[in-house]
Image (cartoon, rainbow, N blue to C red):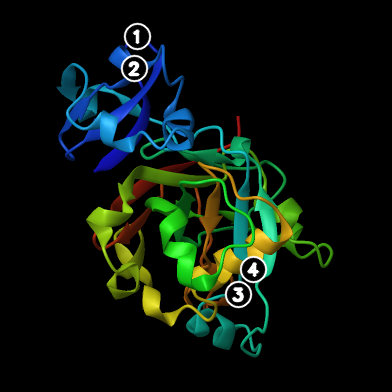
Amino acid sequence: MRLISFLRPDGTASYGTTDGTTVHDAGAELSGTYADLRAVLAAGAISELSGRGPQCALDEVTLLSPVPNPDKIICIGLNYMSHIKETGRDKPTYPSIFTRYPSSIVGHGTPLVRPKVSDKFDYEGELAVIIGKACRHVSTEAAQDVIAGYTCFNDGSIRDFQVHTTQFWPGKSFEASGAMGPWIATADEVGDVTKQTLTTRINGNVEQQAGIDDLAITIPEMIAYLSQILTLQPGDVIATGTPGGVGRFREPQLYLEPGMTAEIEITGIGTLSNGIVDEA
């Protein structure tokens, strides 16, 4: 299934499923039991959404980040071998971890905002893993069992703020600078995610492309490592890193400007598309 969170035409929030053209508004029937999609995941009730709720066209709703209110957004840096090579680093032994806040993430079709204080707004196409079960001390062998599904992620980065110090967080948490969506493709629908390909297009031009099998630290290894540190909760987001081709390391450099469009496509999942605007 493809799971979505959205605003109805009247502006009220809901959740449900889509086939890419039609929405089933499951929240219209189930909101008294599950307040939002995160609650659905926590209850292990994804199957209850299938075909549930009144229908409308997808283009009649405003897509939100699929999990608008995750407990955690955990990002893994420098995790595609192509990106590691372009930065001149060696393959990591442990994942490089930083966090983002939900306020920094918008949904498919909502503009990304270039902040007033910088013109170094970069794109990073990524695969995001959505956790489906509360878990701690998960083995790599059992990691697949705690994954609810996958989505596309744009880890929009304000590069000058990112490198002010050794801490990445400032450049990764500007409001509305990143995006996630358009939906969560459930793990059973995607199958072996390492066989999928990630492509980033800026104004239609391919700037990043890599197989998910290029990850230096695998998804099971990430989950096992993170779950040693803290309990992963249903709806938690793990952004797994970006391939080579980011704007900062191009010659000449390529940064996002108002009027541009950034698309992140992952085969078997979908395409996340966002325009760019300046902060008001």
The amino acid beneath tag 1 is Asp
Dot in front, 4 or 1: 4
Q: CA gap, disc 1 to disc 2? A: 18 Å
Residue beneath disc 2 = 30
Q: Is residue 245 left or right of residue 26?
A: right
The kind of residue on which mark 3 rests is: Leu
Q: Earlier in the sequence, mark 4 or mark 3?
A: 3
The earlier-in-sequence mark between 1 and 3 is 1
The Cα–Cα distance between marks 4 and 1, rounded to whole angstroms, is 43 Å
Say which amino acid is labelled 2.
Answer: Leu
Q: CA distance from mark 2 to mark 3?
A: 40 Å
For residue 10, the mark is 1
- Mark 1 or 2: in front is 2
Residue carrying label 4: 225
Q: Position of residue 48 (x, y in %)?
A: 27, 30
Q: Residues within 10 Å of mark 4 (few under 14, many from 20)?
A: some
Q: Give the structural element (helix, strand or loop) at label 3.
A: loop
Q: Earlier in the sequence, mark 4 or mark 1?
A: 1
Q: Quadrant of the C terminus?
A: top right
How far across and how far down the image is residue 186, in percent? 31, 49
Check whether the beta carbons of the residues at disc 4 and disc 1 lie within 8 A of each other.
no
Q: Position of residue 61 (x, y in %)?
A: 29, 23
Q: Which residue is mark 3?
A: 78
Q: In the image, is 253 to the left or to the right of 137?
A: left
